[in-house]
Amino acid sequence: MRPGAVSAAALVSLSLLSLGTVQRPGSPLPERMADTGGGTQLITAVAARTGSTTGTVTWWNRKGGRWTVAGSAPARFGSGGLVEGTRRKQGTNTTPTGLYGMPYAFGTEAAPSGTRYTYRPVRRNSWWCQDNDSRSYNRWTEPRAADCRARQAEHLITYRAQYAHALVVDFNYRKPVRGRGAGIFLHVNGRGATAGCVSVSKSAMRQILRWADPARAPHLAIGTTGGRTAVTRY
């Protein structure tokens, strides 16, 4: 190669570097993701494949340009596995993959000491509307909205253990699409797989709430280790 010439491989590497897509081998998962939400905190919920009902939740801090693990715990997903959020259908018990904000927290028990998220207490008249015909679709209503049929709403107090502590996941939330699904949360484990949420142990959920800081814009990334729903796509 003549002096001063640059190989094709080197040009490709330089181009990728300028796009910020070259990663060091073994780099932390958030550094291999297309988007982390722009904040300095992140939660990843990763399953082996779309048919999985278990996986791992990890929460991360970004400091000095690097992501480091703040904590990790076994996780459960929907009994129907995982599916791309934009393709999800209500009633399938699937967990939607994608990158989501977390607007607020709630619980049947008091917020753990140090919680910085807005924390809404669950009362006897607290409901989450899943009625596609209701103006309150995919919203907390207290009491249950008149146009939200009880059989198509979740009476939150009924799930004292699962909703001891929870974070609302911004899936189909800000601009709800009817029929896509409602009431997706990060919450405490029940007896088995979820109806589409992500769940962890109660102790892990309490750790997450003490750690999470809305001022640092934490997001939740849900996905698989590879394929079309790989968490690195988000």
Image (cartoon, rainbow, N blue to C red):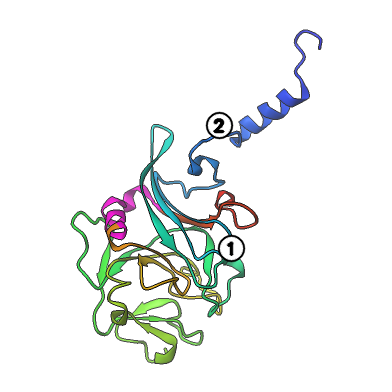
Residue at image mark 1: 50
Camera-nearest residue between 140 and 45: 45
| Image coordinates for residue 15, horizontal then vertical, percent | 68, 30
| Image coordinates for residue 187, horizontal then vertical, percent | 35, 66
Q: Residues within 10 Å of mark 1 (few under 14, many from 20)?
A: many
Q: What's the CA distance linking mark 2 and mark 1?
A: 27 Å
Task: Say above or below: 78 vs 65.
Answer: below
Residue at image mark 2: 24
The amino acid type of the residue labelled 2 equals Arg
Camera-nearest residue between 56 and 143: 56
Residue 147 visible, this orientation: no
223 vs 152, left or right, is: right
Task: Say above or below: 225 vs 149.
Answer: above
Q: Which residue sits at x=53%, y=71%?
A: 94
Instruction: Look at the magenta stretch and give its main secondary structure.
Output: helix
The amino acid type of the residue labelled 1 equals Thr
Residue 32 placement: quadrant: top right
Q: Residue furthest front?
A: 191
Residue 143 placement: quadrant: bottom left
Q: How many marks?
A: 2
Q: Which residues are magenta?
A: 204-218
50 vs 207, left or right, is: right
Camera-nearest residue between 65 and 186: 186
Magenta stretch encompasses residue 29? no
Magenta stretch encompasses residue 217? yes
Tell me the element at label 1: loop
Quadrant location of the N terminus in the rendered image: top right
| Image coordinates for residue 7, horizontal then vertical, percent | 76, 20
